[in-house]
Image (tube, rainbow, N blue to C red):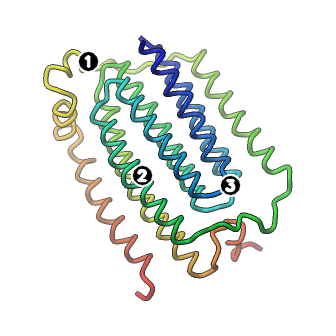
Amino acid sequence: MELALFVVLAVIAVIAAAGVVVSKKAATSALFLLLNFCTLAGLYILLNAQFIAVAQVIIYAGAIVVLFLFVVMLLSPDKEEGKDRKPYTRIFAVFLAVLMLVEVGYVLFTGVLGGTTGQYTPEKIAEVGNVQAIGQVLFTDFLLPFELASVLLLVGIVGAVVLAKREL
Amino acid sequence: MVPSSYYLILSAVLFTIGVIGVLVRRNAIVILMCIEMMLNAVNLTFITFSRYLNSLDGQVFVFLVMTVAAAEVAVGLAIVVSIFRLKETTDVDEINLMKW
């Protein structure tokens, strides 16, 4: 059951990712990206990360894709022609990327993948709920990154407003 | 239970598709979309390891990665908009003032 769900979601995610790269129009790419994000949220639920799944839908599918669509509609970039690149650059790029995939696959199948095992088994998380468990870790062990993330968001807001103004 | 290598292979494939998109496409906005896809592939790896090592550090890290990605998309799109105001194009091959 879990395997069937994983296979369905994985196939849809890969097809949507390919759709992002292959689409002619930028708006179609944004919609394929939305599908990719939603299938990834489903995969996170399969991996017992319910809070991250909901955060994925809210942040990525609900804010970032909307922002992309706004910019795509504003700039209406439909002129994809122009000076074409030499034909071998695309093939070389795909070859390099596939080479990287082969490397990663090699490490996956022959390397020893592991780390220090923690104590948050799914049963222990289910006692208090996923959100509370993440909160316990976030506000004790990861307090400094959390505060720095809020500073980073402030910097991002100020930067985006300054960059997009017509006259400073 | 699904073996962890299945999720890791899926994450590697999504990352590779993102890399191909960044290298092949010429529209700056689609390149930013493919960067977001790469970030999501890495998020999937983190959550996979968080599940199979019984740890919550991966999920907290993914939370922070999402924060960084949101800020990066906002600033990146602001840069694309201001370049578009200057050159009326989003084609990255046209942004070649510093080319010698």
Q: Nearer the N terminus, badge 3 or badge 1?
A: 3
- Kindly identify which residue carries mark 3: A24
Real-space CA distance between mark 3 and mark 1, rounded to the nearest whole angstrom: 43 Å
The label number, if any, that marks residue A122 in the structure image: 1
At 68% from the left edge and 27% from the top edge, which residue is drawn?
A102
On the rendered structure, is B11 left or right of A151? right
Real-space CA distance between mark 2 and mark 3, rounded to the nearest whole angstrom: 25 Å
Quarter-of-image position of residue A11: top right
Foreground pick, A80 / A110 = A80
| Residue type, label 1 | Pro
Quarter-of-image position of residue A105: top right
**Chain ID at mark 1:** A
- Kindly identify which residue carries mark 2: B69
Badge 1 element: helix
| Residue type, label 3 | Lys
Residue A57: x and y in percent read 36, 43
